[in-house]
Structures are given as structure tokens and as C-alpha cells.
Amino acid sequence: MSNTTDYVPPKIWTWNKANGGRFANINRPVAGATHEQALPRGKHPLQLYSLGTPNGVKVTVMLEELLAQGHSGAEYDAWLIRINEGQQFGSGFVAANPNSKIPALLDYSNGDSPVRVFESGAILLYLAEKFGSLVPTDPALRAECMSWLFWQMGSAPYLGGGFGHFYAYAPFKIEYAIDRFAMEVKRELDVLNRRLAESRFIAGDDYTIADIAIWPWYGGMVKGQMYEGGEFLQVQEYTHVIRWADEIAKRPAVRRGRMVNRVMGPLESQLHERHDAGDFDTQTQDKLQAKA
Ligand SMILES: N[C@@H](CCC(=O)N[C@@H](CS)C(=O)NCC(=O)O)C(=O)O
């Protein structure tokens, strides 16, 4: 691969499989399944296929919040999809999400032909509407909530795919790319900081799916948990975002939701699969490994 200053794009792009990038082994220029692999199905109507990344955590936090509110219909089975092993390209997963990215949800509430939902924002909205919770009904408040929800869906790719990729994962450092995405992410953090200076939660006085969507990405960033980029971006400047992130992190449902499908960090924080509320006490990796 050429370095950044002498690269001249050829007339026609070709796929260089060994480009050295961190995700070179799973990135492909085509969609569709690479192998036959049915998805497992558990006992609950809601079947989640995911991984404990910021996009995955949004959905497990949402489900745990709904359960904490007493919506027993939000009981779910969470299955682990190991994206670094290419499990998102199995035929069953591709049927659930043709875009081959976690999270994907199948809702069997109406029988054996499930409703499929993919894209974390769509899943949050689907669940919020299904249970009538965590999304305002007042039209003005709802519009504010939707605006921030869709803001997150459009903005986080600059944080993850832009800044995170070029700052932490690219095989060499490209000043132009890091500079461009650092500037954009700082601007996004300032957008949130100004909003949270005037409002307790993102969409107003109440905690909503907008907070659930934004917290794993931007809450993680201001707490220095992403890409080891906290000092570089001087995240301590965004004091209102930090205040908000700390408040959300204390919620019991958030503490549970961030453990589900997590494969990194302390073993007691990793619940690879979740099939029952009791799993948080008995099925974390520290307990499973002690039993083995
Ligand atoms: N916009 C999507 C993004 C989902 C996404 O990027 N998922 C990543 C993990 S955080 C993934 O599955 N990557 C696997 C791949 O790209 O092959 C959403 O919010 O659901």
C-alpha cells in the first residue's frame, strides 16, 4: 500500500484484501451471506443478535430500561455475534439485517414469522412505540427527541468511522484525516455541551431514546473510554456532557445493559449471552470460568 502523499487513485478501484487496516479481514466491497448459519432462537419473543459495542449497548440498555419499568414483554434473549470472526455474514444474520451489522432484532410476538428490525435507531424507536415508553407523545417534544435520535445516527460515523478509525486503527497516521475528523468530533461535542447546558437530558426534562442512543458514543468519549483519544480531544472541556454522562451511567438499567454481549474488560462485567434476568448474577464470565 502506498503512503498518503504519493497515492494517485487508479482509473478503477480494485479490492486490496491485505491493506493492513484493523478490520481488513472482515471488510468486503460486496453484501450478502458468505456461509450458511441459522440464528439460534431462545424462549422470549424478542431475540437480539448483537455485540457490546456502542451501537449494541443502545439496545440492551433500552430493553433493560423497559424491564425496569415493569414491561415484562420486553424480556429478551441476547445472542453474541462475533463480528471479528465474520458471524455477521452468516445467512441467518443477513436475513435479519441485510446490512450485516449488529444490532439486529427479531420480534416473534405475533408467531413464527418475526418482525425484523435493524439499525440501532430503528430498533430503539420500534421498542419505544411497542411499549409506549421513553419517547414523548407531545408533538413538539417528540420532534425534539427524533431530531436528536437522528442526529446521533448521522453524527456517530464521524466519531467512530472517521476519528476513531484514523486516530486508532488505520495502519499509519494521516494528518489530514485525523485533523478533519478531530475538528468535526470536537464540534459535535460542543453541540451536545451547549444543549446539555440548557437541558437536563438531550430532548428535555425526561430521559428518552435520544439519551440512550447518544450516551454510549459521546458519553464514552467524554469519559475517556474511546480510542484513547480523550487527552488529544481535551474532552474534559465538555463539562455539561460529562455531568449528563455520569448521571446516566448510574442508572441500574444502564449498568446491566452495558454488560450484555460484552467481550472486553473485567470478566465480572461480561455477560456474553443474556436469556434471563438472573443471568447477571450467575452467568458473567468470572463465574462461568470459576465453574469450568
Ligand atoms: N448504523 C448502524 C451501525 C451498526 C454498526 O456499525 N455495527 C458495527 C459494530 S458497532 C458492525 O456490526 N460492524 C461489522 C461490520 O462492519 O462488518 C446502527 O446504528 O445499527
Image: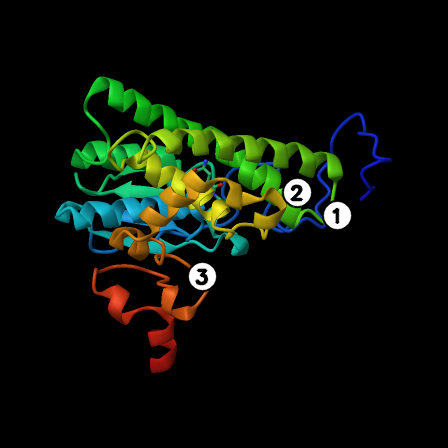
Q: As shown in the figure, which amino acid type bears the numbered disc 1?
A: Phe
Where 206 falls versus 216 (above or below)? above
Q: Which mark is residue 166?
A: 2
Sooner in the amino-acid sequence: mark 3 or mark 1: 1
- Front residue (pair 21, 39): 21
- Front residue (pair 108, 141): 141
Q: Quadrant of the C terminus?
A: bottom left
User: Helix, strand or loop at disc 2?
Assistant: helix
Q: How far across and down, in percent of the image, does residue 155 sit?
A: 49, 31
User: Helix, strand or loop at disc 1?
Assistant: loop
User: What residue sits 39% from the left and 42% below the top?
Assistant: 215
Is residue 92 at all visible to an observer of this figure?
Answer: no
> Label 1, on which residue?
172
Number of numbered labels in the structure image: 3
- Marks 1 and 2 in Cβ contact (< 8 Å): no
Q: How far across and down, in percent of the image, does residue 40 sit?
A: 32, 55
Where 271 falls versus 92 (above or below)? below
Q: As shown in the figure, which amino acid type bears the numbered disc 3?
A: Val
> Label 3, on which residue?
263
User: What residue sits 48% from the left and 45% below the top?
Assistant: 222
Whole-angstrom CA distance, mark 3 to mark 2, is: 23 Å
